[in-house]
Each structure stands twice: as C-alpha cells, then as structure tokens.
Amino acid sequence: MSALAGGTAVVTGAGSGLGAAMCDAFAAEGMRITALDINREAAESCANRLVDSGTEALGRQADVADRASLDTAAAEVAERFGSCNVVAANVGVMQFGRLEDISAADWQWLLSVNVVGTANTVNAFLPLLRAADGPRHILLTASMAALVPTPRQGAYITTKFAVTGYGDVLRQELADDGIGVTVVFPSGMMTTHLDSSRAARPRELGESWMRDEDFEVVVATAGTGDDVITTADDAIHDLVHDMLAGEPYLITHGSRLDEIRARHQAIEDAHQRMRAARDERARQQPR
Ligand SMILES: NC(=O)c1ccc[n+]([C@@H]2O[C@H](COP(=O)([O-])OP(=O)(O)OC[C@H]3O[C@@H](n4cnc5c(N)ncnc54)[C@H](O)[C@@H]3O)[C@@H](O)[C@H]2O)c1
C-alpha cells in the first residue's frame, strides 16, 4: 500500500496538462484530490473524472494570483478533508518574446501568477500541511528552461528561476517541519499551455500576443534529443517516487546535461577566479 494512501493532495492548474496528470497519479496512490484551476469548468471536470473512477475529489475555481480565492479553497479542504499531505503549486503562464518587447503589463502578469501565485499557494495550504499526519510534500513546477535558459522566453524563464530559488529556500525553511520540497523541471509537453495562458490573462492587462518568429526561435533552441517533448502523463512517471524519496529536484525529460554542465562550469570557474585573485592579493599584502 502506498505511503500516500488515504492522504489528500491539492493541485493547482489541475484542469489540464501536467496538473491533471498529477491528479491522476495521486489518485492512483489512493489519495483524495482537490483540483484547483482558474477555469472552473476544467477544475470541475477533472474532479468529476476522478470521482467517476472511484476517487474522492473536489474541483474548485481558484486564481493563484488571488490569495483570497486560495484561502477559500483551503477552508473548504480543511472542512472536507481536515488537512493535506501534498500541495502541487503547478500553475505557470507563458509569454514569448524578446526581453525588450515584454511590457510592464506582461511582467506584472507573469510575476503575479508564476511567482506570487506559487507563494500564495504554498502559504494558503501550509497550515493544512503542518496539520497532516504521514508524508508531507510540496511540489513546485519550474521548467527545464530555468536550467538551460534560451532566447525569446526570457520573462517566463525569469519567473521559473524565481520558482527554483523559492523552492531552494523553502526546502531549508521547512526542513524542521519534515515537509519536503521538490522542484519539477519539465521540458516541452504536449499540453494547452499557450492557449490556457492566453485565456487566463486578465483583460485589464490587454491581449496576450505571440509572434511566429519568437515561437520559431523557441522551438529551434529547445534541444535536439529524442525526449525534448512528451506527454504530461509520461513527464510525471517518476514524480511520486522522487517526491517520496525527498529529492530536491525532478527533471522529467529532455536530455540537456551538456548545457547544464556548461552553465555550472562557468559558475564554478567564476568562483575559482575569485578565490585565486583573493589569494594573490593576500600574498601581495605587505606583512
Ligand atoms: N507545456 C510545456 O511545454 C511546459 C514545459 C515546462 C514547464 N511547463 C509548466 O508546467 C505547468 C503546467 O503547464 P501545462 O503545460 O500543463 O499547461 P496546461 O495549459 O495544460 O495547464 C495549465 C493550467 O493552469 C491553469 N491556469 C492558468 N492560469 C491560472 C491561474 N492564474 N490560476 C489557476 N490556474 C491557472 C489553466 O487554466 C490550465 O488549466 C506550468 O507551470 C508550465 O509553466 C510547461
């Protein structure tokens, strides 16, 4: 029997793609599911699908950029399930384009959903995680693009770097509570990401825009391995295992080790130069 059986999972962006696949994976472990999405119909249909297959599930509309809507959902989870064992802060919206073309409104939207929305989700459900018995975990969806940054998606990548840093600090801050934090780095997935992002953008920030030219650059720099793109179900194949093992990071697919190494090597080299220069200056100090 799974260590998660009988526990409760809360997933944001659960109406589609990776979030929906996470709900299925947790349901397969015998968990009760709360599926949250800005798209009410999508959240409810995810929950209905799970209920039809014998899982206790709740589907609710919640906008992660709006803390109050998450607090309402958390109050309902507390009443219905008492606590929760897994919180997947999975929402992220996308805006392609050169950094110089990203408007203040674009930045506001991406940061408020991808970064503040992640913190809102964690903060709204942390009391319920602390109240739970058994395994307790937070999953944060970043992106391979935060490990291998490429052009024309710089604003999105900036937010996924932020999610990664947030996760690294959160893991240390929650270690004494016994709450694990795993940051998930997917490569391309066949989901509705661009359409759902466009649909979720608040009207007052103006229409979302996309240039074919930007899209072509993003595709051309997405890597060349045979696993750069996959389905959401395939991407979460190792999610439960790695989460329960307390792994800090999960790379779901997309073999880009050379690029990851090159970036880390440049950071290591910078550190070595600093150390050598400081040692040299110390040697030249008059005694
Ligand atoms: N699809 C990819 O290629 C890819 C690659 C790397 C990382 N990711 C990340 O995976 C995560 C899931 O994306 P996906 O590909 O499954 O997309 P998706 O479109 O299938 O699902 C995203 C869901 O999030 C919901 N959503 C959007 N804004 C919201 C908000 N403010 N509050 C609540 N829900 C909101 C949408 O309605 C949608 O149902 C995102 O964080 C994304 O950045 C996706």
Image: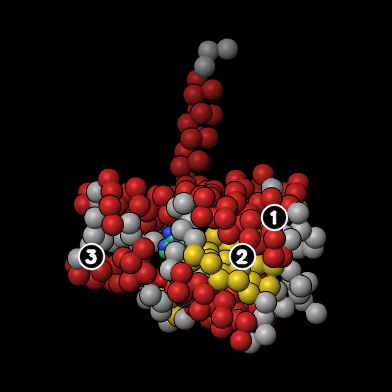
Q: Which mark is residue 10?
A: 2
Mark 2 or mark 1, earlier in chain: 2
Image quadrant holding the N terminus, namely bottom right
Identify the residue shown where x is 67% and y is 85%: 54
Q: Is residue 150 above or below residue 35?
A: above
**Which is more toward the observer, 206 or 80?**
80
User: Which quarter holds ligand 1?
Assistant: bottom left
Q: Amino acid at mark 3?
A: Met
Q: Is residue 13 above or below residue 168?
A: below
**Dots 2, 1 in contact, CB < 8 A:** yes
Distance from Cα at disc 2 to Cα at disc 1: 10 Å
Q: Which mark is residue 128?
A: 1
Q: Give the class, few, some or many, for how many residues have Cα within 10 Å of label 3's Cα (few <14, many ≥20).
A: few
Distance from Cα at disc 2 to Cα at disc 3: 32 Å
Horizontal placement of 30 versus 53: left or right?
A: right
Identify the residue shown where x is 76% and y is 63%: 135
Identify the residue shown where x is 64% and y is 71%: 33
Horizontal placement of 209 versus 55: left or right?
A: left
Image quadrant holding the C terminus, namely top right
Residue 200 position within the rendered picture, expressed as x and y whole percent measured from the top left: 36, 63
Residue 165 position within the rendered picture, expressed as x and y whole percent measured from the top left: 52, 48
Q: Which mark is residue 210?
A: 3
**Dots 1, 3 in contact, CB < 8 A:** no
Residue 197 position within the rendered picture, expressed as x and y whole percent measured from the top left: 35, 65
